Amino acid sequence: MKESYWGYWLIVLGIFVVVILLLVRNVTSNNTEDYYNGKEIAEQSMVDAIDYGYFRYFGELRINKEKFMESFLRRFVDAVNGSNDYEITFTAIYEAPPKVSVEIQSSTDTYVVGTDSTSFDLVNRVNYILEQNSNS
């Protein structure tokens, strides 16, 4: 009889560990996805926002701030899944030389274990500088 109780406790412990692993995997995979989405979208949006008229006339890169913000938000909404709430803050945008800093804050679903409810707030900061080759 004692051995069967040990078996039951071992099964309960296994289920508990699997649940914890699923929760941790969900949080870490969302964090990784948000970071790489932010990084790639910032690069693509900066290329979209290049002011080619300024480049032709002066030979230096410059981006349009409003066009960058519009392109970033449009691309980010298309790229993310709808399970998380996001708050995007543009902390610094310099038009010439082109540099952007974007902060992406996301909160995961609320997990209820017993009487405790927990949600995780994740913040990813992306800094991106667009450079040009100076082959003269």
Image: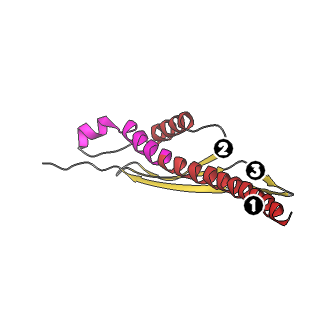
Q: Residues within 10 Å of mark 3 (few under 14, many from 20)?
A: few
Of helix, strand and loop, which mostly describes the magenta segment? helix
Disc 2 designates what residue?
84
Q: Residue at x 52, y 51 (%)?
A: 32
Q: Which mark is residue 10?
A: 1
Residue type beneath disc 3: Thr
Dots 1, 3 in contact, CB < 8 A: no
The dot on residue 128 is: none
Q: Nearer the viewer, residue 52 or 110?
A: 110
Q: Are marks 2 and 1 in contact (CB under 8 Å)?
A: no
**Secondary structure under badge 1?**
helix
- Dot in front, 2 or 1: 1
Q: Residue at x 30, y 50 (%)?
A: 131
- In the image, the segment drawn in magenta is 37-58
Q: Is residue 95 something that shows in the picture?
A: yes
Percent from the top left, x then y, of residue 84?
Answer: 66, 44
| Amino acid type, callout 2 | Asn
Whether residue 103 sits left or right of residue 134 in the image: it is right
What is the residue that sits farthest to the left in this orientation?
A: 136
- Rendered image: mark on residue 110: 3
